[in-house]
Image: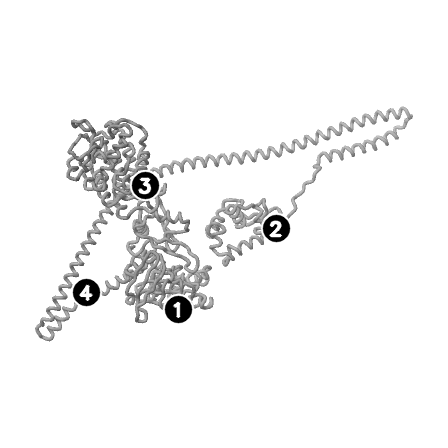
Amino acid sequence: MLSCFSRSVTLSDQSARTSNGYGTETYYSAITNGDDYDSHASSFTPPTPMTLSNSVPVELAGAIPLIDKFQVEGFLRAMQKQINSAGKHGFVSKRSVGPQGCEEFTFEDMLCFQKEPIPTSLLKINGDFVSRAVKLFQTILKYMGIDSSEKGNQVGLEERIELVSKQYLIRAWELMYMCASCMPPSKDIGGYISEYIHDVVHNHNTDSDVQVLAMNTLNALKCSLKTGPRHTIPCHEEIEALLVGKKLTTTVFFLDETFEEISYDMATTVSNAVVELAGIIKLSAYSSLSLFKYRKLLEPENEEYIELNDNKYIGDVLAESKSAKDQCKLIFRKKFFRESDEAIADPVFVHLSYVQLQHDYFLGNYPVAKDDAAQLSALQILVEIGYVVKPETRTDWTLLLERFLPRQIAITRAKRDWELDILKRYRSIENLTKEDARQQFLRILRMLPYGCSVFYSVRKIDDPFGLLPESIILSINKRGVHFFRPVPKEYLHSAELRDIMQFGSSHTSMFFKMRFAGVLQLFQFETKQGEEICVALQTHINDVMLRRYSKAHSAANSSPINSDVSSTSNSRPPSVDVGKIREHYLLNALKESQETAKQLSEELYEKERKEIIMQKEVKTLKDMLNSERQNSEELSFKINELTTLCEEKESALQVALIDKRDMEARLSQFSKVELENNTKKELIETTNQVLQNIQDQLRTLSSELHAVQYNDGFSSDGELSSVVPLFIHTIVSAAAATVTDKGENSTPKTRRAAFNRDREAGHERLLDDYFDNNPVYDEKMFKRRFRLSKELLIKKAKYLEAYHSFFRQSIDARGRRGFTTYQKCTAALRQMGYGTTSDNWDEYLRMSKRTA
């Protein structure tokens, strides 16, 4: 890889010289000093820095001190062999004009660009890496769009200019930028590359696009040379974001479950992320804070926080978590609590310290007495809700008591006793503000022997006394090292800093050599956080030594004055011993002042350097702000246009809706009138037909009667008049019955039988399970089953009830109340969240398939 990296540099070097990178063409000429070999490899004398300084162009002069790292002889012989086997007579445009007319290949030729694959690596490396270098160079040619399969007798000057046109030059610098961001070269090669890139950046003839890429490459190379290579292969998103100049984002959480988003790219380290996050939350003092990788563990440890190295890449952290399929989160918290933290008044710093101590207190890492536990709970409640005259009337009073009282301590007394004690203490601190309560909470925990500690989970390897359990929790603070039993949480033993004689760590273990009962004993523990433990312990020891040194320094400054005063009061001349002592003190003071001046000068230089960096960042941010402002103005103009268009469309839609309602009303009226007319017309037609039938029958009967009268000799009109009315009444009755049957519906209307599902009981059960003040299932179960929090669901339910008629509780035709909003929302969310059928909620919510 290193040889390919150097190869890409020389490619960019030659491209910049022959194209518009520097703006001038380079004319090659044969320089024969007797230090090259001919095209037939008949003789060869290895070049030296002295001979190369006269023959190599200025752009390649930086590579002369590195000639021992290049395999010039092997490369050129292999190249000549490759050319001869392919039937070529040369591979670069440089040609010899010597008396024999044969080509000569030099160190300069080896560093020049060619489109054919290289036969071997440029640098002296192991055989396994040589084949990799050859394959990687072929990959580079493909990435640049150069087809190495094209065969030609010679790469002439015109073809070379074509190959290194701006398109290939930009691709070469993009590749250089990616490699510099994640794969830094060695220090020797890195110095040569940095010098070359610096020349390209500050050359006025360099193309503007190339200059931007070169500047980004130089900055990335500085960071990667200091930090080291990436441990994982950058993903596609990181590479794409790097090339387009964008940054990816990830979430960093705090211990109080709040979070912030930070941006990162391929070269962003943990220290860079900490600085960015401190700027987001406006934290000025962040030297004792860092990023940790958090993951949930099984009992008894519960959870684990692994501190991330400042030089570790954020991309590596996320890639490792993704590959291991761990449910890890990035947590921003303190590495250790220092004695100097008490003097920091930054409100954000104080809040972070309070949150971390509160988190450790909830976990039971600070065993306290009952009185202290009640006082701490009262202070936390005051910080949470402020002072309330009757806090016990609040709906969340019970939740506050359970939240701010650790479970291990709560079981030591009755619940009512705790409530009365905490309520009494809460009323006694009514004059405190939230900030005062927070400071008093921190003060109480600092007074504990193991207060303001950082906790680590370890396993015992060697215990000289056999008193420690297998699993131990170590806590380290300014007083020393403390040992706890994990389950149940119990304080075991402490060792002061002055009793710890020696300590050290490896990747999997650590040890303490400390005085125990007046005898030095060796304790060994298994842990992967040994380095963090040793750093925390050494930091506290340094603080103690610095405090003692300050006291001795102040005492030394006051001693000569006291001796002068005493000698003057006694009216005795100073003795020789007093003069020597004073001289000794003055010398010490002079040394200390010199060291202080040196330290201050270093701090001043560091501040000036940071100021320059900040100025550059401010300039960049101003440019970004201007561009963002311009984009926001364009977006606001587009939004206004869209808003106007939406209003016009909405007004047109309202008009259309009004017209639609009118048309529907008219259509309904017309339909009713038309239906009545059709019904009457059908009845009239039916009646007319029946009457016509009756008339026909009457005529038939009349003719029959006349025939009967004629045959039988009826002569009396009375008999005829008595028979005809009776017959006509019978026919008319039948016709009336027929008309009545025709006018009525033969099939009677029926309704669906009512089925009482007791929907009110379903509503009451739902409230008792999830929405009551003391529900059966807590907030965590609610969030897991509904896929959102209770507060959000209630808010959405109110919105649906206000704007959608389906989700309102209505009254049906029988006068019974319908399903409530919560029943309908619950059925909808459960079906969408679990993909179940609507019949599944009949037993629980008492809701039929048609409604659900």
Crowding near pointer 2: few (<14 within 10 Å), some, many (20+)?
A: some
Q: Nearer the viewer, residue 237 or 250?
A: 237
Label 4: which secondary element = helix
Q: Which residue is rendered at x = 34% and y = 42% of the image?
A: 238
Q: Which residue is rendered at x = 19% and y = 67% of the image?
A: 555
**Which residue in the rendered view is the most extreme toward the front?**
42
Name the residue type under label 4: His
Name the residue carrying label 3.
242
Name the residue type under label 1: Ala
> Which mark lies nearer to you, 3 or 2?
3
| Mark pair 2, 1: CA separation | 55 Å
Name the residue carrying label 4.
553
Name the residue type under label 2: Arg
Residue 757 - label: 2
Residue 454 as seen in the image, left or right of residue 210: right
Q: Earlier in the sequence, mark 4 or mark 2?
A: 4
**Which residue in the rendered view is the most extreme toward the right?**
713
Q: Which residue is rendered at x = 13% and y = 71% of the image?
A: 563
Q: Nearer the viewer, residue 629 or 146?
A: 146
| Mark pair 4, 2: CA separation | 87 Å
Residue 369 - label: 1
Q: Earlier in the sequence, mark 3 or mark 1?
A: 3
Crowding near pointer 3: few (<14 within 10 Å), some, many (20+)?
A: many
| Mark pair 4, 3: CA separation | 53 Å
Image quadrant where residue 738 sits: top right
